[in-house]
Image (spheres, rainbow, N blue to C red):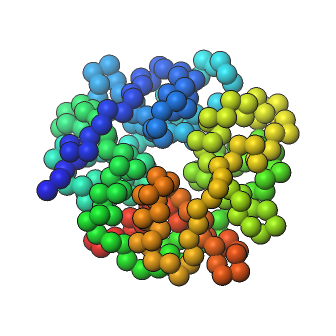
């Protein structure tokens, strides 16, 4: 039986007195959505994610990460993968920290790498319409970036579908905002940079009556975490993400 240590990987760490700009640089250039915060003895103190670092728009800032620390999902090295998944689901995070009994951080398990393993073991049950989140927040391609930036920071959502004349034409995510070099300047100056200059296209979708298993395979095949749900009239009726799929797995 595979356990947490089998999927363990090194995840960048920071200290309380590190600047948010340092965290932003690491998250922008790497695959991680979350970074762990440790003390001087490498004991886990918590984590911060992309939404946290997006709150600071200055290119240079003396704001430290201390005020952004949140409780991380924690597991032991020998924790079964199903229990690792439960810890991630309970914390609504994208990783679980692997810690020893004394709190020493050894590494982490990324949800994006755990997800395919779980799906290969147990096929999700039910239909997309039973697992999806309904009435998602959307935006239009011509909306100013600073509005969507503030919406993502305050709402806690990881991405929004971009809709034009009722058609979903793209997705804009936290990582899109983080990687776009001109976004922080646009936000700070309330400039008119628009969503269509930053969004990800083309967009992959599912239908409400598709099996959740179909949605999970698309997520694995395309390495994406969220899918818009489109009905037979091409209307957006919801979104489904990895956490929703995880809830559909047999317990």
**Quadrant position of residue 100:** top left
Q: Nearer the viewer, residue 86 or 126?
A: 126
Left or right of 44, for residue 163: right
- Residue 109 point in image, percent of width and height: 32, 44
- Residue 129 point in image, percent of width and height: 53, 78
Taking 174 as reference, is 22 above or below it? above
Left or right of 204, for residue 192: right
- Residue 232 point in image, percent of width and height: 66, 81
**Quadrant position of residue 110:** top left
Left or right of 2, for residue 204: right
Which residue is drawn at the image coordinates 40% and 50% (left, top)?
112
Q: Nearer the viewer, residue 86 or 219?
A: 219
Left or right of 113, for residue 104: left
- Residue 107 point in image, percent of width and height: 29, 35
Which residue is drawn at the image coordinates 53% and 22% (left, top)?
22
Which residue is drawn at the image coordinates 39% and 68% (left, top)?
247
Taking 146 as reference, is 79 above or below it? below
């Amino acid at each position: 039986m595979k356990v947490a240590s089998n999927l363990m990987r090194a995840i960048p760490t920071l200290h309380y007195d590190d600047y948010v700009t340092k965290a932003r640089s690491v998250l922008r250039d790497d695959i991680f959505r979350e970074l762990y915060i440790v003390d001087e003895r490498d004991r886990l103190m918590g984590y911060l994610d992309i939404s946290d670092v997006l709150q600071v728009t200055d290119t240079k800032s003396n704001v430290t990460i201390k005020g952004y620390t949140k409780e991380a999902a924690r597991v032991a090295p020998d924790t079964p993968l199903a229990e690792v998944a439960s810890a991630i689901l309970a914390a609504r995070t994208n990783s679980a920290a692997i810690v020893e009994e004394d709190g020493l951080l050894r590494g982490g398990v990324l949800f994006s790498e755990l997800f395919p393993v779980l799906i290969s073991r147990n096929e999700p049950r039910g239909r997309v319409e039973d697992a999806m989140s309904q009435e998602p927040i959307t935006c239009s391609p011509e909306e100013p970036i600073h509005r969507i930036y503030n919406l993502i920071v305050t709402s806690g959502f990881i991405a929004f579908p971009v809709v034009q004349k009722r058609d979903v034409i793209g997705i804009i995510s936290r990582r899109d905002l983080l990687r776009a070099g001109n976004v922080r300047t646009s936000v700070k100056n309330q400039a008119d940079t628009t969503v269509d200059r930053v969004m990800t296209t083309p967009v992959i979708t599912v239908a409400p009556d598709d099996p959740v298993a179909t949605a999970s395979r698309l997520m694995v095949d395309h390495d994406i975490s969220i899918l818009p749900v489109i009905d037979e009239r091409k209307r957006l009726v919801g979104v489904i993400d990895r956490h929703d799929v995880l809830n559909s797995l047999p317990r």
